[in-house]
Image (cartoon, grey):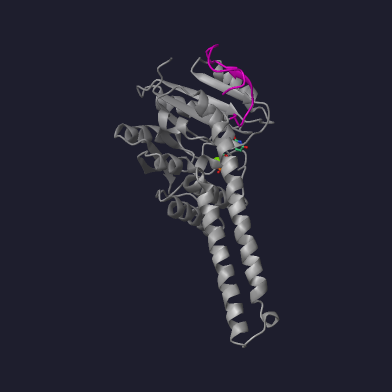
Amino acid sequence: MSNYHLSLVIPVYNEEENLENLNQKIKEVLTNSGYQYEIIFVNDGSIDKSFEILKKIAAFGPDIKIINFRKNFGQTAALAAGINHAQGEIIVPLDADLESNPADIPKLLAKIKEGYDIVSGWRKNRWQNKFFSRRLTSMTANWLISAVTKVKLHDYGCTLKAYRCEIIKEVGLYGEMHRFIPALASWQGARVTEIEVNYQPRRFGKSNYGLGRTFKVILDLMTIKFLSGYSTKPIHFFGAAGFISIFIGFLAGGLAVYYKLTQQKDFISTPLPVLTALFFIVGVLFILIGFLAEMIMRVYHETQRRPIYSIKEKINFPAQGGSASGG
Ligand code: UDP
Ligand code: MG
């Protein structure tokens, strides 16, 4: 077991023009900081020269490591692989595009020293000139996530954050869930705070995401909320919905019978009998779906977690470190 204080985890997808500059900046900031650190670059199936450049950079020393994916698995998978292989006490993910400044890293670390488990970066001046197209959606998204998760942060999307190793390794990462790590960890009892960090638009390459991401984020948010509340007892969620539906069905049926008995309206002159049948059937189906979800969840909790990525090769990792499939 090596004793790094710090692991930088950097997902890389077609960032050939940024990598050398990035490595240089990290060196400037951390060389005399007193922190023993490793850098883990995760090459997420880049189709430009990123991997060649990374190999050159890694030749400078054993503390610069590369994980090379077979294909593009996405930013969350890249972060997950880097985090699983990180050996530092503190883990700091960082974008390769230099939108965040490595000079902010010591500030994050200082906050961790104060006793926080997660320190989140807040790119306060991002989207200054694009109020309607980007800033408004970003503010709304962050407000929504904060409201639903009850973890108040201004900038969930900022990759630059610092995590205590044991906190982040417990959070399973799926889909595009990396932005929810602070919320998931906070639900497990982690202490979370945020500080302002610098932001600079990309100089080279282009962003891999557009506005379409908003909908994915909202769906992800609903998923984690549902899973956190009901993943071990889905029947409580579906069962409640089912009972409500059946209850409405009874009301509609009762009303229809009342009209009939008081000779106000015939069964066929109102939609009530149809509604009765509809709500009744929907209610029963909800309960059955609940049982199905229970069975699936039991299987889910009992199966081993499969990694969501596949590693082709690793560079500068000790030979015995981890299995070949990267678990
Ligand atoms: N990235 C990745 N795999 C992908 C997409 C992005 O590893 O499929 C990396 C990318 O190289 C960058 C980081 O994730 O280091 C953030 O991506 P990007 O800058 O495109 O996102 P944005 O800053 O627009 O949120
Ligand atoms: Mg970026």
Name the residue nearer the viewer: 192 or 303. Answer: 303
Looking at the image, residue 113 sits to the left or right of residue 179; the answer is: left
Looking at the image, residue 235 sits to the left or right of residue 50; the answer is: left
- In the image, residue 259 sits, relative to residue 7, either above or below, namely below
Q: What type of secondary structure mainly makes up the magenta span?
A: loop
Which residue is pictured at 57% across the width and 75% down the height?
Answer: 254
The x and y percentages for residue 259 are 60, 83
Total of numbered circles in the picture?
A: 0
- In the image, residue 289 sits, relative to residue 26, either above or below, namely below
Residue 130 visible in image: no
The x and y percentages for residue 12 are 59, 32
Q: Residue furthest top?
A: 319
Name the residue nearer the viewer: 156 or 171. Answer: 171
Find the magenta span and give its range. 306-327
Q: Residue furthest left?
A: 114
- Judge whether residue 318 is colored magenta: yes
The x and y percentages for residue 264 are 61, 88
Identify the image quadrant of residue 315: top right
Identify the image quadrant of residue 324: top right
- In the image, residue 149 sits, relative to residue 29, either above or below, namely below
Residue 105 visible in image: yes
Which residue is pictured at 45% across the width and 41% down the height?
Answer: 184
Identify the image quadrant of residue 58: top right
Ligand 2 is found in the corner quadrant, namely: top right
Which residue is pictured at 30% across the width and 34% down the height?
Answer: 115
- Judge whether residue 309 is colored magenta: yes
The x and y percentages for residue 168 are 45, 33
Image quarter hosting the C terminus: top right
Image quarter hosting the N terminus: top left
